[in-house]
Amino acid sequence: MTDYQADLFVIGAGSGGVRAARIAANLGARSMIAEEFRIGGTCVIRGCVPKKLYVYASRFAEEFEQARAFGWKLPQQPEFDWPKLVAAKEAEISRLSNIYETNLRKAGVEIFEERAEILGPHEVRLIRSGRVISARHILVATGGGPTFLRDIEGIEHAIGSNEIFDLETFPRRLAVVGSGYIAVEFASIFARLGAQVTLLFRASNVLRGFDGALREGLREAFVAAGIDQRPGVLPTAIARTGSSFRLRLSDGGDLDVDRVLFATGRAPHTQGLGLEQAGVALDAAGAVKVDGYGASTVASIHAVGDVTNRVNLTPVAIREGHLLAERLFGGGVAQVDYDLIPTAVFTTPELGTVGLGEAQAREKFRCVDIYQTSFRPMKATLAGGPDRIVMKIVVDGDSDRVLGVHVLGDDAGEMAQLLAISLRLGAKKADFDATMALHPSAAEELVTLRTRTARFVREDV
């Protein structure tokens, strides 16, 4: 296509970068990619995939107990083997990483397993080999990583979500700092694997930004699971005490734990890439500023995924990378549509949500109708326990269009994925009502929920 050595040089072989490199190569571009750690990025190596495997592992303890209520006799008390789980996880992510690499090579993408930095609008340098490569287009897809509260004495003793997967020994007492989805997911995982978990966070409740009904439902579920939630309390110092750690807390108390996990946010990986020297603008958080097509302030340099700090989800990065490659090399003109993205939080119980929550809807629409229910899952009728499913439908009271659906309970993520199709097609509450129920199922409540539980009307509109 050009006299450049590469038509597209991608820095970062995570989900977004790999997709862009492959699509570009399939469209005839000479495509190269550099990765300094392991091919697969956050999702495959230290994020979504290993996390979901650990979620599955964490749910077996309760299922063993529930099985007794359904007539099963367990010959002995089940025992959990942490090293075996870690090893099984490692085998699976290695398999997936190899698949990513194989697919890149099949597409004709040249791979460099070393760090790369940008020298200018059309040049990158491979750090280990020192090789300089000219490229018509450069794509930054380096993702992000955990952040820590650096003003805490002894913060070097804390670990982030990258390290938690590979601890040599299982932490019987775990402090998790944070209240976002990463924090609550790990709190849920380790509590159900048998750890005594303390959740420390600045806010008044977990999962800021999610619908209030789900936040409250999860808080109650965490109480039932024995997770010690301490809103408004953060560590002010961490000291090693032999093989354990003592936290000094902002409420004046102390807490002794085996590990301290910080999950207080993530920051884009942009330091040391040469972006600013090349003229690429970054925002206050260090993210690459891009337009709707993924173009930075330098015409030949682009960015997708978490490094742009827009919607930090794996499927979003994949879509961004795909459409960028099609625009650069296939004449594509489509932009990513960030509306109605389904989201799951893989706690137990898990959250599945798509569209606007109640608070968001009330800010944007004149009249908002709420349909909400809470009920025991059928499984609990024999197994017992405090489990509750929460479902909430948010509706535009003027047009009857469904604005959002929110579920807390088993398979909530699966429901959210399918509900997203209905919402994208503009489904109305009447369409939900006219849909035949599938019985017996939890999801049938979404089409049998007829009684409006609240209506909010704004007088200022």
Image (cartoon, grey):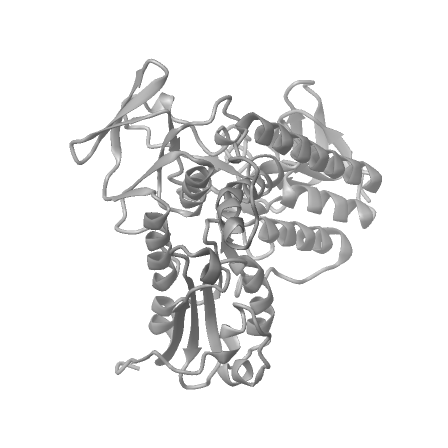
Q: Quadrant of residue 257?
A: top left
Quadrant of res 395? bottom left
Asked if residue 289 can be seen in this view, the reply is no
Q: Residue at x 23, y 44 (%)?
A: 232
- Position in image of residue 87 (x %, y %): 62, 27
Q: In terms of depth relative to the viewer, which is nearer, 414 or 208?
A: 414
Image: 38 above or below 179 = above
Query: How many numbered tags mark residues here?
Result: 0
Vertical position of residue 435 compared to residue 304: above or below: below
Please give the name of the residue rendered at 56% of the width and 57% of the height, measured from the top-left corner.
292
Quadrant housing the C terminus: bottom left
Relative image position of residue 55 (x, y in whole percent): 53, 43
* Percent of width and height locating residue 173: 36, 29
- Name the residue rendered at 79%, 36% in the picture: 102
> In the visual, does 237 lie left or right of 25?
left
Q: Quadrant of the N terminus?
A: top right
Name the residue furthest left: 252
Q: Position of residue 216 (x, y in %)?
A: 33, 58
Residue at 26% across, 81% down: 460
* Looking at the image, residue 410 lies above or below residue 194: below
The one of 54 and 308 positioned closer to us in this rendering: 54
Residue farthest along the top direction in this orientation: 242
Asked if residue 85 shows in the view, the reply is yes
